[in-house]
Image (cartoon, rainbow, N blue to C red):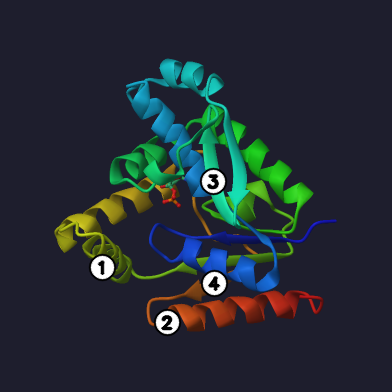
Amino acid sequence: MSFNIAIDGPAGAGKSTIARQLAQRLGFIYVDTGAMYRAMACHLLREKIDPGDREKIEEACRHADITISYENGSQQVLLNGENVTERLREETVGNMASLVSSYPVVREKLTQLQKKLARSADVVMDGRDIGTAVLPHAQVKIYLTASTAVRAGRRYEELKAKGIEKDLKDIEKDIEERDYRDMNREISPLCQAEDAVLLDTSDMDIKTVLESAVRICREKSKAL
Ligand code: DC
C-alpha cells in the first residue's frame, strides 16, 4: 500500500514549498493539485469561457485532457498533450482556477486523477481538500496556514523578485477574496480535517516549517 501525506491550507501559506521539500526529503513524489485546477482554468481562458457559464464549462471540461508527468523530479502539467506548466502561475489563471473549482464536474475529473496518482506511489499531495475529500485515509495530514498579512507580504516579495510591482493592499484583498471562495464553496470547501495537524507558519521560516513537517510525519510512521 502506498504512503500518502496530505497538505492543505489557504493560498500563500507555503504549501507547495514545504510539500516539495518534504517529498524530496522522504523520497516521495510531490503532487501539486492546484496546478491541475490551474490547467483547467488555462483551458477555459483559452476557450474564452465565462466562469459563470455552467453549461459551457461542463462541455469544455469534457474536452480537457489533463495529465501529469515528471521531469528531473519536477511536476509538469500537460493540457491536451501540451506542456502548460510555465503559464500556470499567472494571477489570471489562479483567479479563474479558484472560480471554476466550485463546479462538481471540474472537481470530479481532477479528484479521480489525484486518487489514481496516490494509489500508485508514495506521495506528498497539496491542495485544499486533500485530507478531507481526496485522500481521507492519508496516513499523515497537515493543515498549513498563516495570517492574511503574512501571506500577502510573502506574495508581494515573490512578485517583486520577478520585477512585478503590485500594491500590498490589493494583494491582501485578492487573498481575502480567494480564501472566502475556497472556504465557502458548496463542494469540498477548504477546511482543516479533524485528524490534521495544524501548522501556523506566520512566525516560522521555511527551515523550521520543514523540520516540523518531517517530525509530524516521523511521529506517525517510524519507517519514514
Ligand atoms: O494552490 P493554488 O493557488 O495553485 O490553487 C489554485 C486554485 O485551485 C485555488 O484557489 C482553489 C483551487 N484548488 C482546489 O479547489 N482544490 C485543490 N485541491 C487545489 C486547488
Q: x and y percent of residue 110 in the render?
A: 59, 37
Q: CA distance from mark 1 to mark 3?
A: 25 Å
Q: Give the mark nearer the N terminus: 1 vs 4.
A: 1
Residue 167 shows up from this direction: yes
Name the side, left or right, on which 42 lies relative to 176: right
Mark 2–mark 4 Cα distance, whole angstroms, equals 13 Å
Tell which circle, 3 or 2, labels the residue nearer the N-terminal end: 3
Residue holding disc 2: 204
* Kind of residue sitting beneath label 4: Leu
| SS for dot 2 | loop
Where 90 sits versus 153, above or below?
above
Pointers 1 and 3 in contact (CB under 8 A)? no
Q: Which residue is mark 1?
A: 157
Residue located 51% across and 23% down the image = 61
- Quadrant including the C terminus: bottom right
Label 1: state its secondary structure.
Answer: helix
Instruction: List the residue tagged with mark 3.
Output: 76
Q: Nearer the viewer, mark 2 or mark 1?
A: 1
How far apart are the alpha carbons under marks 1 and 4?
25 Å
Of tags 3 and 4, the one toward the viewer is 3
Q: Residues within 10 Å of mark 4 (few under 14, many from 20)?
A: some
Tag 4's secondary structure?
A: strand
Residue at the spot x=57%, y=81% of the render?
212
Residue behind mark 4? 198
Which residue sits at x=49%, y=46%? 35
- Residue situated in front as seen by the camera: 71 or 208: 71
Identify residue type, mark 2.
Met
